[in-house]
Amino acid sequence: MKKIMIKENDANQRIDKYLKKLLCNASSNFIYKMFRKKDIKINGTRVNEKYILQKGDVLEMFLYEDKFNELTKEKDIYQLKREFKVLYEDKNILIVDKPVGLLVHGDANENVNTLSHQVLSYLKEKGELDISRESTFIPGPVHRLDRNTSGIVIFGKTLVALQDLNEMMKKRHHIEKSYMTICEGKLIKKQELVGYVKKIENEDRVRFVKKDDKDALMMKTIVHPLNYTNDFSLVEVKIITGRMHQIRIHLSSIQHPVIGDRKYGDFTLNKQMKQKYGLNNQLLHAYKIKFVDPFGSLSYLKGKEIICPKPAQFKKIEKSLFESVL
């Protein structure tokens, strides 16, 4: 029989979800068969798959040690050079500045050197990451940025914090996210944009659709001009929803595309920007978050604002385009 003491970062979740992560080499059928055969106990009492684990629970499984070792595996924590900057950190969360070019999660081309893996490497070096065989929780990001968008990414360092952050993001209005960008054209007035989009199948992009279109997703964006010339505008953008490429497609839809945007932008202008400034991607920076109405384990963050400085390339282009503006 295998016994495991449930720790804080594995509590407050259904036991079947915990076991699927713990016994990562086992099939779902194998796990649910263990419940049917009554091979799983908590504190000496048999439970079903819906049981919510509590800190301090003793989980008993009728598995021999060699079978347990076969069905579990040590987690790979890569030793990686840290490319991100820490903007804020406490025992529950980590807020970082992601540079352009770094993926938050892996893809088909890069699955090792990602922001998520760099954060795990950083926490391991600090001695804050439990990678024992019995632990299933891994700190993770609450949201993502495109590879070539820079700025703020929030990580939950504990299961409870990650659950609360995910719930806040889902309900909206609890965490306010603001971006900075330079777009084409003269944008003078503040605008509130609402539209509906749908992901294009087998393509890494979205398109506008009608409200009643199947699988249509509503998106809401608030655009506030900060500076402008006849040709360009520096704008702050707040996203009320969090859709794929939301800022880029919304600004493009009102004929003010983000400079450098290769998917929704002005290709002739992008070529000029690349030649003059070496800009080869959308100039979009997640520069500020505010905890407007946090709850649960993170209620102490109410009113806290985190600002992420603009990257050097952004500041260089901004200075060049707007330096003559009074």
Image (cartoon, grey):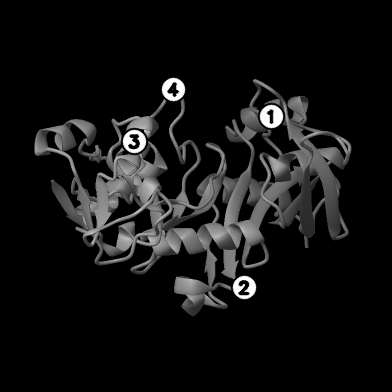
Q: Residues within 10 Å of mark 1 (few under 14, many from 20)?
A: some
Which percent across, then down, holds residue 152?
52, 55
Residue at the spot x=39%, y=44% of the render?
116
Q: Which mark is residue 205?
A: 1
Q: Which mark is residue 33?
A: 3
Instruction: Give me the C-alpha separation between circle 2 and circle 1.
Output: 31 Å
Instruction: Give me the C-alpha separation between circle 1 and circle 3.
Output: 41 Å
Which mark is first along the chain, 1 or 2?
1
Which percent across, then down, holds residue 178?
65, 59
Instruction: Give me the C-alpha separation between circle 2 and circle 4.
Output: 37 Å
Instruction: Give me the C-alpha separation between circle 1 and circle 4.
Output: 18 Å
Image-based side of 23 in relation to 94, left or right = left
Residue at the spot x=69%, y=25% of the render?
271
Say which quarter of the image contains residue 67. Answer: top left
Which mark is first along the chain, 3 or 2?
3
Image-based side of 84 in relation to 184, left or right = left
Marks 2 and 1 in Cβ contact (< 8 Å): no
Which mark is first along the chain, 4 or 2?
4
Which mark is first along the chain, 3 or 4?
3
Mark 3: amino acid: Lys
In this view, the mark in front (1 or 3)? 3
> Residue tagged by mark 4?
109
